[in-house]
Image: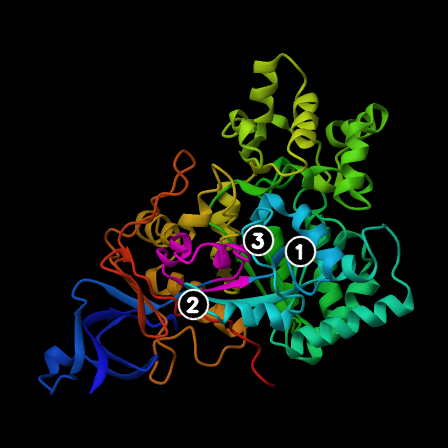
């Protein structure tokens, strides 16, 4: 007898087709049968060792977070309710060009320092891996939800070239190509870049194109955080489209927003650009989060020349008064490339987390607010905080536009990605609320998407981009990564004031056919594993 039958569920199967009523039978981690309208048809209903009454609940494929920053959180926190409670059953890690494999001892420590604001320094983690394959093996020891990995191009460059602003030599480029091939062979699904973050931003398009050619040979995709989401955003999107076309590589645009005042109301221009490329045969997708503020680190706003050489070099420049004044001028007057070419507006920069607990008074306040209370300029406050916390502060950037958010999420190649940073005392609520917010706010309350459309955006479309043949749909033979939610009550609990509050209306989540959320509570099940590239 099979393990589980989910009885009388309203199945939204991820395809975009209308929902239907069915009994769904799960056994050994797979969906083994679907009996539609079983109660009305009067047929013999399937039986199993356990029955779950799903009357009034929607059964959907588990949600796929196409842009996650849980690279260490999955190892640090076996509970991981931040994602499991949202119905997320697969996260894509290695984002924005910076993560923890492939590395050597030197690069590992440098990367840990550089993205402390994303993931913490990791003092509680045993970094017993160096290669992509070893990191995936570490995930296979048991995690809350499944995870896939993108080779981070910035980490790759740090390993081979260093943190200097210069072209890679032919020998260095060959070595990076080798490492991309190795990472893909070991199970990575593609490559990411963070082209406003050092050292990845120092790569010219020709270098990126050569690496993308290798990714394409393995059927992977390129996922860039491109060179600007502010001034010159459309040109930055065009650059990535042209690069991917030249390399023959599939393209997935990370957190594809149009932010800052210069881009208010310009989402249709981005979509027109995408439609033109798609009509010409380009393979493009994108992800967004359903919020207006962004999130990153305070150090990420610095101009690229000030970040050259790695974290220690940055701290030395900040400590020097003359150099610090040059940095201020670029940030406040010129518009630093780290701040997307837009002069920084300190009243939009909210500190969301710090590494040193003694600095928690800054958290939850904008830099401008803290500066006023201290009787100093915003730059003096920001500089002092960066030095005191050794580049660790994370921030929220209140620079988005609601009309752009809604317009982009309607596009047919759109998928969902939380971009959720779990570090800090007051992280962005998207880390805990992205997927229920789509369902509650943008489906039920605002009607921006139908329920069937929205579920497809969060399930089958990302599964297709990841080339996963047995995920993203409620189909016989598919993996039983499933979520059950109440369409009348599902909602994000997290807010900017209380960002770690869990969602409502999602009573059950299964990973590999096992309950990780049951009756609204996290179980002790660690059914997640690394999801590796499927052989071509």
Query: Residue 90 at what x, y percent from top left?
Result: 46, 66
- Counting residues from the start of the chain, the first of labels 2 and 3 encountered is 3
Identify the disc placed on residue 98: 1
Residue 480 in view: yes
- Counting residues from the start of the chain, the first of labels 1 and 3 encountered is 1
Residue annotated with mark 2: 459
Total marks in image: 3
Q: What stretch is highlighted in magenta?
A: 65-92
Tell me: 237 left or right of 2: right
Quadrant for the C terminus, please.
Answer: bottom right
Query: Residue 238 at what x, y percent from top left?
Result: 71, 57
Residue placed farthest to the left in the image?
A: 42
Residue annotated with mark 3: 255
Residue drawn at 58 percent across, 37 percent down: 355
**Any magenta on residue 303?**
no
Quadrant for the N terminus, please.
Answer: bottom left
Looking at the image, is mark 1 or mark 2 nearer the viewer? 1
Question: Is label 1 in contact with label 3 (beta carbons under 8 Å)?
Answer: no
How far is the residue under mark 1 from the one under mark 2? 25 Å
Tell me: 433 left or right of 32: right
Query: Residue 371 at what x, y percent from top left?
Result: 61, 19
Residue 284 in view: no
Residue drawn at 33 percent across, 62 percent down: 524
Secondary structure category for the residue under label 3:
loop
How packed is label 1: few (under 14 Cα within 10 Å), some, or many (20 or more)?
many
């Amino acid at each position: 007898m099979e393990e589980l039958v989910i009885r009388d569920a309203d199945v939204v199967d991820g395809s975009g087709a209308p929902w239907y009523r069915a009994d769904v039978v799960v056994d050994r981690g797979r969906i083994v049968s679907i009996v539609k309208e079983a109660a009305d048809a009067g047929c013999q209903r399937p039986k199993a060792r356990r029955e779950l009454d799903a009357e009034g609940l929607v059964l959907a494929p588990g949600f796929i977070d196409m842009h996650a920053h849980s690279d260490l959180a999955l190892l640090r926190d076996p509970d991981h309710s931040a994602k499991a409670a949202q119905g997320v059953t697969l996260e894509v890690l290695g984002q924005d060009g910076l993560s923890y494999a492939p590395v050597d001892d030197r690069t590992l420590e440098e990367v840990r320092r550089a993205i402390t604001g994303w993931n913490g320094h990791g003092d509680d983690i045993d970094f017993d891996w160096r290669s992509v394959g070893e990191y995936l093996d570490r995930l296979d020891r048991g995690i809350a939800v499944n995870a896939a990995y993108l080779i981070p191009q910035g980490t790759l460059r740090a390993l081979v070239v260093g943190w200097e602003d210069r072209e890679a030599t032919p020998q260095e480029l060959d070595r990076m190509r080798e490492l991309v091939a190795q990472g893909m062979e070991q199970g990575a699904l593609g490559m990411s870049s963070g082209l406003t973050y050092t050292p990845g931003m120092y790569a010219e398009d020709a270098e990126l194109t050569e690496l993308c050619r290798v990714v394409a040979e393995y059927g992977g995709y390129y996922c860039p955080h491109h060179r600007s989401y502010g001034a010159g955003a459309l040109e930055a999107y065009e650059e990535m489209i042209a690069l991917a076309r030249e390399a023959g590589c599939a393209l997935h645009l990370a957190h594809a927003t149009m932010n800052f005042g210069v881009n208010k109301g310009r989402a249709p221009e981005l979509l027109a650009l995408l439609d033109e490329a798609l009509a010409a045969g380009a393979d493009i997708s994108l992800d967004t989060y359903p919020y207006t503020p962004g999130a990153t680190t305070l150090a990420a706003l610095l101009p690229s020349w000030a970040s050259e050489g790695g974290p220690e070099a940055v701290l030395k420049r900040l400590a020097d008064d003359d150099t610090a004044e040059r940095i201020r001028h670029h940030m406040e007057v010129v518009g630093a490339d780290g701040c997307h070419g837009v002069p920084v507006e300190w009243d939009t920069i909210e500190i969301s987390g710090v590494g040193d607990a003694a600095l928690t008074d800054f958290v939850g306040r904008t830099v401008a607010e803290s500066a006023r209370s201290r009787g100093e300029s915003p730059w003096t406050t920001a500089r002092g905080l960066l030095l005191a916390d050794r580049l660790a502060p994370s921030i929220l950037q209140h620079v988005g536009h609601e009309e752009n958010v809604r317009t982009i999420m309607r596009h047919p190649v759109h998928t969902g990605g939380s971009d959720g940073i779990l570090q800090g005392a007051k992280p962005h609520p998207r880390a805990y609320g992205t997927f229920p917010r789509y369902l509650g706010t943008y489906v039920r309350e605002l009607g921006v998407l139908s329920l069937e459309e929205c579920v497809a955006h969060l399930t089958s479309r990302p599964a297709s981009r990841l080339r996963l043949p047995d995920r993203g749909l409620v189909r016989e033979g598919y993996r039983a990564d499933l979520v059950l939610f109440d369409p009348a009550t599902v909602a994000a609990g997290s807010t900017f004031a209380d960002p770690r509050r869990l969602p409502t209306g999602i009573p059950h989540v299964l990973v590999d056919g096992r309950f990780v959320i049951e009756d609204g509570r996290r179980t002790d099940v660690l059914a997640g594993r690394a999801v590796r590239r499927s052989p071509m």
